Amino acid sequence: MAYLPIILAGIFLSVAINSLLKRIGIPTVIGYIATGIAISAVFGLHHDHNNELSEIAEFGIVFLMFTIGLEFSFRQLVAMRKEVMVFGSLQLGLSALVFGSVAYFFGMEQEGAIITGLALGLSSTAIVLKTLNENDDIQTPYGRKSVGILIFQDLAVIPILLMITIFSSNNNDIFMMLQKIAIDAVIVGIIIYLVGKYIIDWLLQWVTRTDSSEIFLGTVLFLVIGSAELAHLFGFTYSLGAFLAGMMIAETHYKYQIEAELAPFRDLLLGLFFATVGMQINLNIVADNIGLILLVTLVVMAAKFGIILLFMQFFTRPRVALKTALALSQVGEFALAVFSLAQSNLLIDNEQSQILLSAVVISMIFSVFILARVRDIADLFTPEPEPEVSKLESTGFKDHIIVCGFGPLGRKVAAELKCQGVSYVILEHNIHRMESGRKMGEPIFFANAANKDVLKQFDVSKASAVIVAVDHIRHLRLICEALVQVAPNANIVVKLRSEDEREMIGDLKIDHILIQSREMARLLVIEAMRCQLKIQKRG
């Protein structure tokens, strides 16, 4: 029980720090990192518990990689091949070339400079994906490009770690080493493929019949940790095995049930991971080199931003390129593992390692604030694309209905309005959904419904009703706020998932609110009453 005081202190500090930070609008990621820094400083983990610290950090990365693997399948990887292979290789290749050259120029050995360049080219999958998901930006143009580049970086981590092994090996026969690695990779791939194809479905089906969520979750954890251990036995990282396990389970019929079971644990596990990031910081070295560390941090982030912005200009709109560059300008969590391994293999010295580790963590802290304001920063340099608006009078619309959003709910609303013969117009700010609607022949326009000028141009005050078909509560509130300001008497219709969400927009005084659970209960009772009437008539 020697670690119980550390666990208790960690829980107390994370709750206390995050409670304070949330009140002033600072993301919890910062709180977890601060908790890790405080725990390592108070209990002296840097000096006495390096092995335990590494194991905790690896455990966090294992579960992080599993959740990443669970988010996309092999088919999705193929569908995003341009974002992954083209944008990803350009970003990492150019960044590694620039940073590696600078490191070599300032006296680092060739092998260490190569590893340093590649590590600094990595971005934070955990921070970027978490923020994109919270802001519902995964399917936006800049979101898809950011995710594609991050996927390539995650796949590139394994070769980078293998390069460290090769550079530090006394074995001069590199060909034999690469051959062994290739054979081991094939063996691991075949084993995991066969297990995924012939055993996983059967095993999960058998476990599901027990009707026990604990047994089901335990089975999933066994698969994750077992895959991680299998990869490690063949000389690969634990995280690679966990990543493959996630992709393997993503292909099964149980993916969504597994996501539901893991939902309560996901943020906690990410919190543990970010706490281990904070534990990597040695405050003594930071205090002695604070000026150099801040300089390295700012130079690296500015260089990464410039590199991504430069080549993305050739493939996409300036605003998308800018937001992608801002999102990926930090150095990622896997750089921590790379620098630690490089230092233990004597490719870089301890002081260089600590300076780089500190710069990585500080860049991650800076990026949290950048990502929270990425849209506002982009507005300063590249204004929002002009929405496609037309004079509604010229189209013959009168007493029309405006539908905000063309996601799953918006599509169903539009189909029902079309069946009723009602005139309607759709506003959609996602370019892919807008193009999809155009192909379907819908009266859809690329426009941001949360923009008051857009609402005025669509003459929202004269519409018979406005249906806000948006699921994300933050976006829904922004749209409703704009509607209330532009047209206080507009008939706004919204669908909410719970009474809690109703409280979040209660101050807007919207009259037409449908609560999903309540409406479903009402419809179920109506259907049951109809069944009862049929039985009475037959009687």
Image (cartoon, helix red, strand yellow):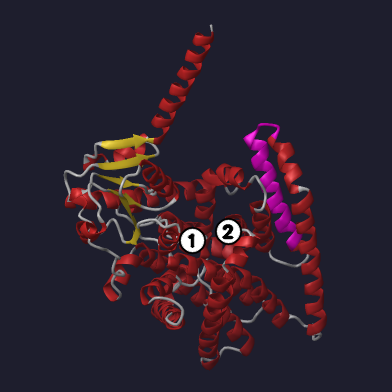
10 Å crowding of disc 1: few (<14), some (14-19), many (20+): some
Magenta residue check for 96? no
Q: Is residue 142 visible?
A: yes
> Contact, CB < 8 Å: mark 1 with mark 2?
yes
Judged from the image, the secondary structure of the residue bearing numbered disc 1 is helix
The numbered mark at residue 129 is 1
In the depicted structure, whether residue 220 falls above or below residue 348: above
Residue 68 - label: 2
* Residue beneath the point at 28% across and 69% down: 386
Image coords of residue 354 (percent x, y): 52, 74
Q: Which residues are magenta?
A: 209-231
Q: Disc 1 residue type?
A: Leu
- Secondary structure mostly seen in the magenta stretch: helix
Q: Is residue 452 left or right of residue 284?
A: left
In which image quadrant can residue 318 be found?
bottom left
Q: Nearer the viewer, residue 258 or 331?
A: 258
Identity of the residue drawn at 60% across and 81% down: 115
Q: Which residue type carries mark 2? A: Ile
| Whole-percent x, y for residue 438 in the image | 41, 61
